[in-house]
Amino acid sequence: LKELGFDLMLTANNHCLDRGYSGLTATLDALDGAGLAHVGTYASEEEAANPVYLADVGGIQVAFLGYTYGTNGIPLPSGKDYAVNLFTTDYMTTLSTPDTQRLEADLAAARALDTDLIAVMIHWGVEYQTTQNSYQEELTDLLIANGADLVLGSHPHVLQPYETISVTGWDGRERQGFVCYSLGNFISNQQDLETRPTAVLE
C-alpha cells in the first residue's frame, strides 16, 4: 500500500477489535513499520490524547480525524478506553447517540492548529444502502458546523452520494463543507453488483 502511494489509513472501524487489543496494536505496528500514517485507533493513552494527524497534501495543510460508530459488540478492553475513536456513546447497544462532546472537543483542537482544511474520516451508515440516512446527514451538519471542511465516509460497501452543504458554524457564521457519505469498496471480494464499482475521490 505504501509503495502504491497510500499515505494515511483510517484504522477505526467495526472490525478493529476482531482480534482483540493485541490485533489492534499489531495492525498499528505493521503500519508504522511500513511508514504509513494512521488515525482512529491507538496503542497508548499518550497517542490517543492527540487524535489530530497533520499532513501536507500537495502544499495544503490538512488536519485529519477518524472515527467509527462501534466495534461489532466487542467491548473496549478494560483500562483501554482510549484504544478506539468512537463517535457514539452507546456503541454496545443502540449505536444511536452521537458523542457530541467528544466530536466538538476534537474539532476545536483541530481548529486551533489553524490548518488550511480539516478532514473527518468516519465509519458509519448502513451496509449496502446506496443513499445516506438522516443520521449521517445530522452528523455531517454537526461536523461541518464545528469546523470540518471534508467528511469522508466508509462502511456501507457501496457508493453513496456526495454534496456540498451549508450550515451555521460554531461561531455563528455560515460555513460550507463537502461530504461523501460513502466511498464504497476500493477493493474487496464481495460479489453483489453494487459492491463492485470502485471510485477514487480527487
Image: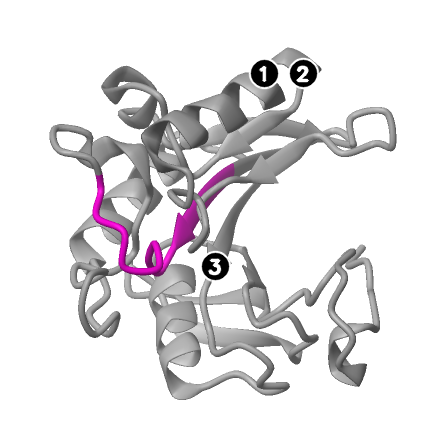
Among all residues in the image, which is located at the extreme right?
4
Q: Which mark is residue 32?
A: 1
Element assignment for label 2: loop
Give residue 9's position: percent from left, percent from top.
60, 37
For this view, does 2 lie left or right of residue 24? right
In-front residue for pair 6/62: 6
Give residue 23's position: percent from left, percent from top.
44, 30
Q: Which residue is mark 3?
A: 123
Residue in view at x 66 percent, y 80 percent? 161
Q: Is the C-beta separation of discs 1 and 2 under 8 Å?
A: yes
Give residue 64's position: percent from left, percent from top.
51, 39
Q: Can you say which quadrant of the picture contains the N terminus?
A: top right
Q: Mark 3 or mark 1, which is nearer the start of the sequence?
A: 1
State the CA–CA distance, disc 3 to disc 2.
Answer: 23 Å
Is residue 74 within the magenta segment?
Answer: yes
Q: Can you say which quadrant of the picture contains the C terminus?
A: bottom right
Residue in view at x 34 percent, y 54 percent? 71
Write the start and end of the magenta stretch as one range. Answer: 64-76
Give residue 171's position: percent from left, percent from top.
28, 57
Q: Mark 2 or mark 3, which is nearer the start of the sequence?
A: 2
Q: Is the C-beta separation of discs 3 and 2 under 8 Å?
A: no
In-front residue for pair 63/32: 32
Q: Which mark is residue 35?
A: 2
Question: How many other residues sit within 10 Å of disc 2, few (<14), some (14-19) or many (≥20)?
Answer: few
Task: Reply above or below: 64 against 153.
Answer: above
Element assignment for label 1: helix
Question: How many other residues sit within 10 Å of disc 3, few (<14), some (14-19) or many (≥20)?
Answer: many
